[in-house]
Structures are given as structure tokens and as C-alpha cells.
Amino acid sequence: MENKKSLSNWLVASDIDGTLNNKFRRLPKRNEEAIKRFVESGGRFTLASGRNPQSMEKHFKRLQIAGTPAVVINGAGLYDFQKKEMVYFSAMSSEGMALAIEAAKKFPTVDVIVVAKDIIYITGTGWFGKLFVSADNLTHKHIRNIDDVPKENWGKVIFSGVPFTISKIKKHFESMTDPDLTLMSSSIASFELLAKNTHKGTAVMKLAEMLGIDPSHTGAIGDYFNDYDMLKTVGVPACCGQAPKELKEISHFVSCHCNNGAVADFLEYIEALEK
């Protein structure tokens, strides 16, 4: 498909696993080709993930999108891989860190993983935390007592453990009245905290502001509940065919299953809007 109109007024962000990649964590060739075409037409494309920059780098660099910062740590940061620096960072407040520490002490059987701006801290026994950092050999320190973790530049806190305990932690935070936090369920075995009003969507909109792109021309695609806030925030939300119905209900466009090139479907939809 050949585009006659420039797409330079568009910014599109995609989740990685289960969205950009298929269920086998492979990049469908169709997605790669569509992203290349979109960028060559002037569009801005980026990735939005819960990963930190070190974990995202290999996914980012295989695409021709190096000029656009990536949304990292579920929206706590925007990282420029060309400059090798964080160009925006939303750190948790002192109140938010204190609430996380209090919960870590109340539920001592969980591992609490602190994803800071430049390093990851694993607290507790470390079993779940080691699984978290092992896949990408992430830079980390194991500090058993969370009180000893430096209290600065916390991007997000992950409670990781058996589903029964994680469910109790979720209820613990959801029972609070207006905590200075954003609460996020990332899986049945993990629960995350970020600074208040911080998620992938707020970072995408910050990036659009930096690039001079109108909010109505921001698009995003995801596949799970940790993408919900991002889809609610951008101008044109989309989800993969296998996404929960809650995401489909708020999406302007529902792509095919991620195994078949969901991102390509969405970019073709954006291209059609400009014809």
C-alpha cells in the first residue's frame, strides 16, 4: 500500500508482548513491514511497555524508530535510545514510597521489586525478583530489607508472589482513600504501584506534547488491562483481537489476533483515516 499523504501528524504507540510480538514473543514480518512503511511516510511510532530501558532496548532497536523516545516503566519514563538518556521521568512521591514500604512489611512473603530510574532493587527472599531480572540479565541489587533501598527516583514498585497473596495486596491498596499512587494489575502473580496519574497513556501524551502532535492524532494499541489507561487516554485507541472485552469496549478499532499482525492492522486503519 502506497501512501500519498504524509503521516507526520501522527504518533502511534504499541505494547510489546501480545501486541507487537505474537504469543511466541516473535515479531510478525507483517508488523515490521507496516511500521517501516508508516515511519517512511513521516509517522512517529514507538513502544510502550512496563519494561525498563535495558529490557526494552533489543525490542526497540530492531525497528527503524530510533528517533522517537520509548515509553518505559509503564509510563514512569520516556527514554531516548539515541541520546541514551531518560528525557522524562515521573517519580513516586514520599507518601507513595511509604505506602509501598508499609505493605511490604504487612505481606513479608512477597518479593517487592523497586524499578528505579537507573537500577532495579529486589527485596524479600528474591525468588520472584530473580525471575524478573534473569530473562534480560537486568542490572539489579538484592537488598533484603526494603527500608535499606535508597528512597529516590522510584519509577514503579512491583509486588510479586503467589496469586492468593497478590489478591490480598490488591484489596489492601484498593481499600485506601485517594492514595498518592496509581494502582495497576499486571498479572495474577503481580501488582504494581506508580506515581499518581502516571501510566502509559500520560507518557504517550507527554511525548506527543514534546513532538508537537495534537492529542487527537495519538494512537495506541494493547492487549491487556495494563494497557487500559493508555487506551482511555489517547485519541485513537485500538486493541488486539484476543484482548478482554473491557478493552474492546473502549477501542475505536479492534485488530486481528497478535499472532497475525495486529499492529499492521492498526497502522493500515490509521493510514486509511488520512486518505
Image: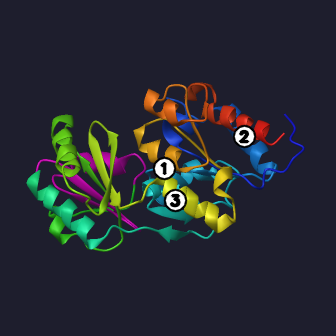
Q: Earlier in the sequence, mark 2 or mark 3?
A: 3
Residue bearing mark 3: 203
Residue 4 picture location, percent across and down: 90, 44
How far is disc 2 from disc 1 in space, using C-alphas? 21 Å
* Residue located 61% across and 70% down the image: 83
Quarter where residue 271 is shown: top right
- Label 1 Cα crowd, 10 Å radius (few <14 / some 14-19 / many 20+): many
The front one of 33 and 7 is 7
Query: Of the numbered discs in the image, which one, if any, rests on residue 152?
Result: none
Depth check, mark 3 against mark 1: the one in front is 3
**Three-letter code, disc 1:** Ser
Secondary structure at badge 3 equals: helix
Which residues lie in the magenta part?
108-137
Query: From the image, which quarter does the N terminus lie in?
Result: top right
Q: Is residue 212 visible?
A: yes
CB under 8 Å between discs 2 and 1: no
Residue bearing mark 2: 270
CB under 8 Å between discs 3 and 1: no
Secondary structure at badge 1 equals: loop
**Three-letter code, disc 2:** Ile
Q: Residue 84 magenta-drawn?
A: no
